[in-house]
Amino acid sequence: MMVLLLVLAAAYVGLCAALFFVQRSLVFPAPRERATSGTTPIVEVPGGTPMLWSSADDRGPVVVHFHGNGEQIGSLGWLGEQLAKAHVSFAAVEYPGYPGAPGAPSESSIVAAAERALRHLTGPMGIARERIVLSGQSLGTGVAVRLAANGWGTRLVLLSPYTSMTAIADQGIYRVFPVRLLMRDRFDSGSLASRIAIPVLVLHGNRDGVVPFALGRALAETFPHARLVEVPDAGHNDLWDHPPTMAEYLAFVAR
């Protein structure tokens, strides 16, 4: 019996070690092929950060968007087109290690790339800071929240957000592991939300099987000025397919 326990303990420690070293491939499953952005141009921000850019109005809002972990900016031209109809300009920032962007993804490298893109927008590209509206979906909500906490943006919209990456892991199959000790990239939005005073819109499907709706609701309750919109019957990957999502999103960012 003692030998069996020792074998099981060794196996568990081995699994923990393996999880620690491969976790970034699980958290950041970057697409391998670069998607074509159609007619929407991609700006190369100095430092190796591609940014999808669609200018719709010289004085109106500029949405700066951060996508989910399995997405890429080349697939987001449709969102820029929808926003252009509401006279809203659109930028989507690529993550290090994703198609077209050198480096490796991590919380620190993604936030650094996002900061470079915002400085480029508000510097050489001449976009006034008060025009910036931050937007994030799934993984990207953690990036958007960090930037808002750093003083960027006049509004913040979050689609399928979480309180932290460790909270997501605690909800799934990884809860048998000490994820709070193993997790490198925590994106701890819950600890930042209380100091973000700008208006926040949270959109979350009540059938989300990846990021539970309860996490989005808990995060929304932490912001001083947030409104939570529960999207009926929406899951994680079909949130945009439900009409309330786009209607609420456009009304918030375009006002």
Image: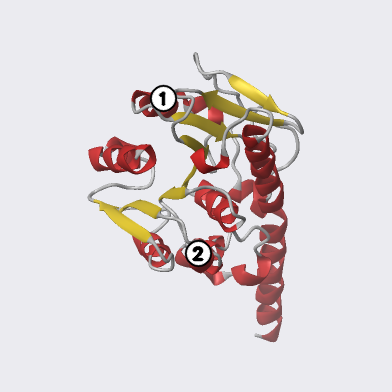
State which quadrant residue 103 falls in.
top right
Query: At x 63% / y 27%, what residue is drawn?
Result: 125
Q: Is residue 232 left or right of residue 90?
A: left
- Extreme-bottom residue of the structure: 2
Q: Is residue 39 above or below residue 183?
A: above
Residue 67 seen anywhere in this rendered image of the structure: no
Number of numbered discs visible in the structure rendering: 2
- Which quadrant, please, contains the C terminus? top left
Residue type, mark 2 in image: Ala
Residue 193: numbered disc = 2
**Picture coordinates of residue 81 (x, y %)?**
40, 23
Query: At x 50% / y 23%, what residue is drawn?
Result: 54
Residue 78: numbered disc = 1
Residue 65 seen anywhere in this rendered image of the structure: yes
Q: Is residue 171 left or right of residue 177?
A: left
Q: Is residue 247 above or below residue 51?
A: below
- Which quadrant, please, contains the N terminus? bottom right
Residue type, mark 1 in image: Trp
**Picture coordinates of residue 157 (x, y %)?**
42, 48
Rounded to the nearest whole Å, what is the CA distance between mark 2 and mark 1? 29 Å
Q: Secondary structure at mark 2?
A: helix
**In contact (CB < 8 Å): disc 2 and disc 1:** no
